């Protein structure tokens, strides 16, 4: 990731307060909260949530989270 791209992401996530950032991460890690619920509550898209999670989680944690999210999507449409 180059510095310009990283700065753009920081600008996007910089608009979120520390509390909102923690809330998004907590909601995204929850198996019961969908991306559409996060978008309604916080106003960021599923792709933005994924970028935020990639930025703020360790690589292994992010990979595990994405795998779990994909499995839920395949099983239940009301999950992420």
Image (cartoon, rainbow, N blue to C red):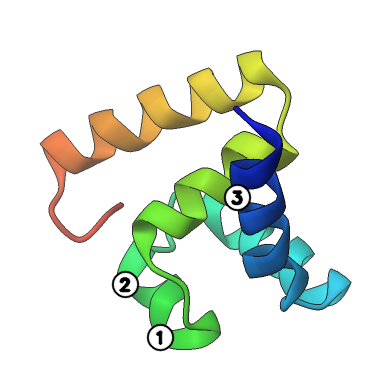
Q: Position of residue 49 (x, y in %)?
A: 49, 55
Q: Position of residue 29 (x, y in %)?
A: 57, 47
The local crowd at label 1, few if under 14, some if 14 to 19, many if 20 or more residues have their Cα within 10 Å, is few
The residue positioned 47% from the left and 73% from the top of the image is 44
The residue closer to the viewer here, 35 or 43, is: 43
Circle nearer the N terminus (3, 2): 2
User: Where is mark 3, residue-wise?
Assistant: 52
Q: Looking at the image, is 44 positioned above or below residue 30?
A: below
Query: Disc 2 vs disc 1: Cβ atoms closer than 8 Å?
Result: yes
Q: Quadrant of the N terminus?
A: top right
The local crowd at label 3, few if under 14, some if 14 to 19, many if 20 or more residues have their Cα within 10 Å, is many
Query: Disc 3 vs disc 1: Cβ atoms closer than 8 Å?
Result: no
Q: In the rendered structure, find residue 36 and report the number of the disc placed on it.
A: 2
Mark 2 secondary-structure assignment: helix
User: Where is mark 1, residue-wise?
Assistant: 40
Q: Looking at the image, is 9 positioned above or below residue 66?
A: below
């Amino acid at each position: 990731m180059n510095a310009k791209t990283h700065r753009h992401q920081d600008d996007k996530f910089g608009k979120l307060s520390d509390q909102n950032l923690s809330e998004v991460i907590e909601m995204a890690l929850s198996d019961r909260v969908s991306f559409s619920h996060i978008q309604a509550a916080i106003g960021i898209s599923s792709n933005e949530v994924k970028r935020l999670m990639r930025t703020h989680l360790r690589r292994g944690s992010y990979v595990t989270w994405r795998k779990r999210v994909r499995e839920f999507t395949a099983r239940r449409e009301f999950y992420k």
